[in-house]
Image: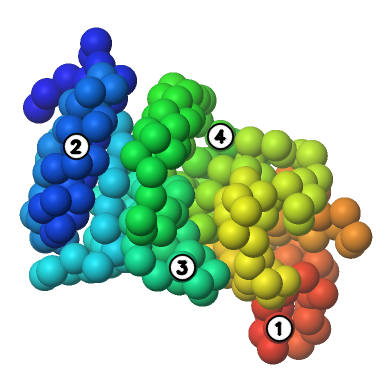
Amino acid sequence: MRSSKQTSGLVLIVEDNRAIAEAVGAYLEGRGFEVDYASNGIDGYRLATDVGYDAIVLDGALPRQDGFEVCRRLRTEARSTTPVILLTARDTLEDKLSGLDAGADDYMTKPFAPQELEARLRVLIRRERREVGAQVLTVADLVFDPASLRVTRGGQELQPSPIGLKLLHILMRESPRVVSRQEIEREIWGNSLPDSDTLRSHLYNLRKTIDRGFEMSLLHTVQSSGYRIADMSTPVAAASPAGRRDPQDAPGELATA
């Protein structure tokens, strides 16, 4: 395994268009980065899990396995925290949200300026280096290690979705403060804001993951203010009775205990 010391960062470019890969790689190397390449999703995933990269630039439309699936596997199977910038020619809001939901940290549409890619890489690498050194987060019996993306409650391993992990990190980091919807949406999706039901749906799924089957509820909706994760000593049944809908839950879903 190579080290990224003395460089701006060790970056993996997964791109099947050789001209784009070589042009981006040459630019980044000229700016102090060290660069590796893969031309398909399978090889990209293998390299991403074998080498300690500082960031990955991942094309969405790849042979053998597309970039969306590679990113999803990195987050859910490999439990990788390596920052991912997804590149794609598709520029609809739905496509952007699909990439972010798969676990990408950022999204750029082709064509793009290499200077902008470099700037985004530097931001993500700085953020990741801070978070890897961050302490393990604990609220009651819920434990989250940002470095490994390992989540447990009462010693039981939990498997939040990629967006669920980001929500959990924000809410546990800020606990017991109430975090507004606007703060959460801006941190997760940046300027590509989803419709009003998207955050509700992800929070509903996160609530099921961390609270269902446990005596006490930790994820709370604070009406007209936002959300928080805290030990409020509130039984799940009392906080969200079976058959009644939490106003912030996913539309059409029942917030059963």
Give the alpha-carbon distance from disc 3 to disc 2, as whole Å: 23 Å
Foreground mark, 1 or 3, reads 3
Crowd band around label 1 with a 10 angstrom C-alpha radius: few (<14), some (14–19), many (20+): some
Type of residue at label 3? Asp
Mark 4 vs mark 1, foreground winner is 1
Mark 3, residue position = 91
Q: Which-is-in-front pick, marks 2 and 4?
A: 2
Residue 59 in the image: x percent, y percent? 27, 58
For label 2, the residue is 25
Mark 4 or mark 1, which has the lower sequence index?
4
For disc 4, the marked residue is 137
Q: In the image, what residue occupies the spot 9% across and 27% down?
A: 1
Question: Which numbered disc, 2 or 4, marks the residue that appears first in the sequence?
Answer: 2
**Residue at mark 1:** 251
* Mark 1 or mark 3, earlier in chain: 3
**Location of residue 119 in the rendering, given as x and y in whole percent from the top left corner:** 44, 32
Query: Is disc 4 surrounded by few (<14), some (14 to 19) or many (20+) residues within 10 Å?
Result: some
Tell me whether the residue at label 2 lies in contact with that at label 4, contact meaning CB atoms closer than 8 angstroms: no
